[in-house]
């Protein structure tokens, strides 16, 4: 597993063009306007000082088919979205604060990232941040710091 993790890191860093500062497992939410990304798609959201990278790896198991909800077909396409930090216009974070609301509503923080694409069109990426080794609050702090220095 350590070898696979290192290979994944090297691949992400090559695509991002720099050292990955932090990464998290995320899922795309309804309201995302990026055409390549659909509701329920899982992937990694990693960032460097200069770019934010969403990376979805193909999932060809019956478990992934069951968790896909309405789109029951097996995912066979890798998806990579690279967003330069300077194109990010807004980052919002929403997290339920009380125990009961976390229990009955959405326990994972929701990030809304607004940015300009290559055609200067405003796009919105809405994600649930599921798991981050460093912890969600640390991830958010590091991401906002990278935005302030790189964006």
Image (cartoon, grey):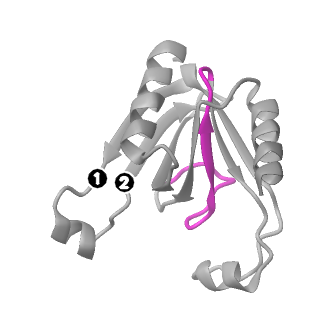
Residue beneath label 2, please? 109
Residue at coordinates 70% horizontally, 49% vertically from top-left?
55
Which type of secondary structure does the marked residue at label 1 adopt? loop
Q: Which residue is mark 1?
A: 95
Horizontal side of 64 relative to 90 (left or right) equals right
Q: Is residue 107 left or right of residue 32?
A: left
Of residues 140 and 94, the one nearer the viewer is 140
Point 43% across, 46% down: residue: 135
From the viewer's perspective, is residue 66 above or below residue 79? Answer: below
Secondary structure at numbered mark 2: loop
Characterize the local packing of mark 2: few (<14), some (14-19) or many (20 or more) Cα atoms within 10 angstroms.
some
Quarter of the image for residue 13 reads top right
Q: Nearer the viewer, residue 17 or 79?
A: 17
Q: Position of residue 114 (x, y in %)?
A: 47, 36
Q: Is residue 144 magenta?
A: no
Q: Locate the N terminus by quadrant.
A: bottom right
Query: Which label sits on residue 129?
Result: none
Residue that lies at the very extreme toward the top in this rendered image: 149
Say if the magenta span includes residue 42: yes
Among the 4 quarters of the image, the one containing residue 84 = top right
Dot placed on the residue nearer the N-terminal end, 1 or 2: 1
Q: Count residues near mark 1 (Cα–Cα under 10 Å), then give few for <14, some for 14-19, many for 20+.
A: some
Residue 28 locus on image (x, y percent): 54, 58
Task: Please report the residue visible at 25 percent of the width from the left and 76 percent of the height from the top.
Answer: 104
Task: Give the x, y percent position of residue 48.
Answer: 62, 27
74 sits to left or right of 94: right
Q: Residue at x 48, y 60 (%)?
A: 29
Q: Main secondary structure of the magenta part?
A: loop
Q: CA distance from mark 1 to mark 2?
A: 4 Å
- Give the residues in magenta: 32-50
Q: Are marks 1 and 2 in contact (CB under 8 Å)?
A: yes
């Amino acid at each position: 597993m350590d070898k696979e993790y290192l290979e994944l890191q090297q691949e992400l860093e090559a695509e991002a063009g720099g050292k990955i500062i932090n990464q998290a497992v995320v899922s795309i939410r309804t309201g995302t306007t990026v055409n390549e990304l659909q509701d329920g798609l899982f992937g990694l959201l990693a960032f460097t000082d200069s770019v934010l990278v969403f990376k979805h790896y193909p999932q060809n198991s019956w478990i992934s088919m069951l968790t896909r909800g309405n789109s029951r077909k097996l995912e066979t396409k890798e998806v990579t979205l690279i967003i330069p930090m300077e194109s990010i216009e807004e980052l919002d974070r929403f997290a339920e604060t009380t125990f009961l609301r976390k229990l009955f509503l959405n326990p994972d923080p929701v990030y809304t990232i607004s940015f300009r694409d290559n055609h200067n069109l405003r796009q919105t990426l809405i994600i649930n941040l599921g798991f981050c080794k460093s912890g969600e609050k640390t991830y958010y702090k590091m991401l906002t710091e990278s935005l302030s220095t790189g964006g």
